[in-house]
Image (cartoon, rainbow, N blue to C red):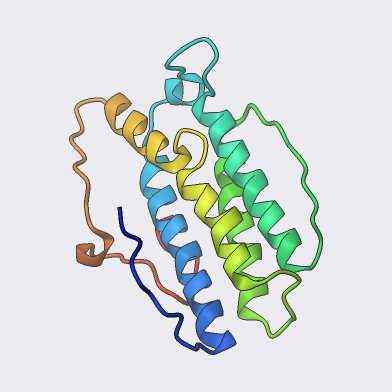
Amino acid sequence: MNQPNVEASPSSPGTDRKLLRHALATLAYRGGKVMRGVPAEFRDFRIGPASRSPIEILGHICDVLDWGLAMAEGEHRWSETHSTVWRDQVDRFFQALTDFDDYMASDRELGFPITQLLQEPVADSFTRDAPPLGWLACKGRELRQGEHSPGVSWALSSHPPSPNSTECGR
């Protein structure tokens, strides 16, 4: 398979930050859709004995976002937190996104290259380990009673993510 021949085009640091912030807003939008209206049993659902439950996956996503903020601040700090309260993890998810976005919206220096921030913590939140957000979306849709929730393009949504805020999708 041939690799595409893509030349990097110069971009400004402000544009790069806006792109990363837009990715965070998209994560907030997609996460909001996943977490809204799921039944109580969703929190502990497992597809197998060794699989992660939705609350564990969401906790991991929050840990990854906290790590992303630490990297933006110039630290390579990882910590795992555990919660058994779904609402606490949902609130933590949106708070982690808000804190990361606030840092990216500032003029503070980045401790790691923006490509690394996008590639590791942000992309990992969408795709790593299941994939987390995608898996939660599928399981949440299956467990909602009587609700058919087809995949929707946020570009066609009445509430698309704003590149200036991670508040969308809540």
Is 40 placed left or right of 109 in the picture? left
Residue at x 46% of width, y 57% of height: 28
Q: Is residue 167 visible?
A: no
Residue 162 image position (x, y, % from top left): 40, 72
Residue 62 image position (x, y, % from top left): 62, 46
Total number of numbered labels?
0
Residue 115 image position (x, y, % from top left): 58, 69
- Residue furthest top in the image: 49
Is 96 placed left or right of 130 in the picture? right
Residue at x 18% of width, y 35% of height: 148
* 44 vs 151: above or below: above
- Residue furthest front in the image: 2
* 148 vs 111: above or below: above
- Nearest the eye: 170 or 18: 18
Q: Is residue 81 visible?
A: yes
Residue at x 35% of width, y 61% of height: 3
* 23 vs 107: above or below: above
Residue at x 61% of width, y 38% of height: 60
Quadrant of res 98:
bottom right
Q: Quadrant of the C terminus?
A: bottom left
Is 53 placed left or right of 142 in the picture? right
- Nearest the eye: 14 or 150: 14
